[in-house]
Amino acid sequence: MEDFVKRWLYDPVVGKLVAAMIGFLIIVALVRFVHRSLIRHVKDTEVRYRARKFTTFVGYVIGILLATTIFSKQLGGLTIALGVAGAGIAFALQEVIASVAGWLAVSFGNFFKTGDRVQLGGIKGDVIDIGILRTTLMECGQWINGDLYNGRVVRVANSFVFKEPVFNYSGDFPFLWDEIVLPIRYGSDHLTTRAILHQVAQEIVGDYVSYAQEAWKDLVKKYMIEDAQVEPMVSMTANDNWMEYTLRYVVAYNRRRTTKDRLFGRILDEIEKTHGAVKLASATMEIVKDSGISVRIQS
């Protein structure tokens, strides 16, 4: 028994295992210490999140390097076997490899970041976590109208960035163009109608214009793209039933629904103040001539 204990204590493999375990424990302790320090000293949520992710990644890399250094001789004998199995492993784990590659593309390619509103693989939502294999979204839409959360947390494989388009609603230009359409009866004062829409737009979304202009200028400098009008714009078309006014405006990507509600409320208030000079239209049927058909009921 004593000889067995001595052989076990002086076995070089056991010594390397013990050294590796001690090294891993030290790495884990350092990573946790850094995480706690970040919580205390870094107030910005995004910077703290990215720092935590980077620290964890560095910990994994150091752990792998430590294991490789300690067991370098033992791993050398596995080179041939790993080479033979490499093709099969790559084929079996191709989705995992693609997801890791997608994570690298997202991290260094500026596809999106935490807090952005995106659409990945047909799923729209806000990015709440970017993992090595999957990106986690708080989903918007589906059975909920408008750009509001529906309560589902969705995890999308990072490999989707290579397979489908990535729609970013809040990337380089954190604004969206939106429109409201208003049907107005023929005979209404079209100049007053246009003035009402301009006035309400300036009141509700006018504050967005200066910020949107600055953001668009940065976009023009960065990409081959033409300048665009970010001021509210009113256009009118006439059809068989009514005059159709369209108000086009820029709005923050996460304020579309509330902004549209405020716009419609103020527009209706202003239309009521015209005392009939401006009237909303609706789909109605109008009989313009009697057909001359008489119906006689006999008992």
Image (tube, helix red, strand yellow):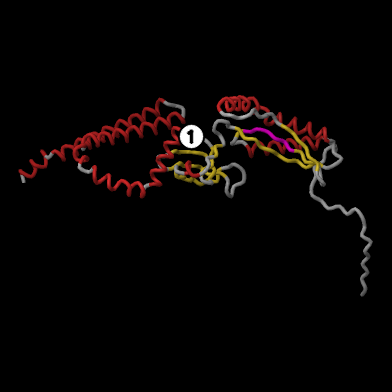
What residue lies at 79% left-to-right and 47% top-to-bottom?
Answer: 282
Would residue 65 appear left or right of 53 to someone viewing this image? left
Q: Is residue 167 left or right of residue 227?
A: left
Q: Position of residue 58 (x, y in %)?
A: 34, 32
Q: Nearer the viewer, residue 120 or 255?
A: 120
Tell which of 75 and 118 is nearer to you: 75
Left or right, residue 298 beside residue 234: right
Image quadrant where residue 262 sits: top right
User: x, y percentage for residue 263?
Assistant: 70, 36
Residue type at the position of mark 1:
Lys
Residue 29 drawn above or below residue 299: above
| Quadrant the C terminus occupies | bottom right
Q: Is residue 247 magenta?
A: yes
The residue at which mark 1 appears reads as 113
Residue lying at 58% horizontally and 32% vertically, measured from the top left? 174
90 or 236, nearer to the observer: 90
The residue positioned farthest toward the bottom in the image shown:
299
Q: Identify the element where label 1 is drawn.
A: loop
Magenta residues, as a range? 246-251
Say whether residue 111 is magenta. no
Q: Position of residue 240 (x, y in %)?
A: 82, 46
Can residue 168 be seen? yes
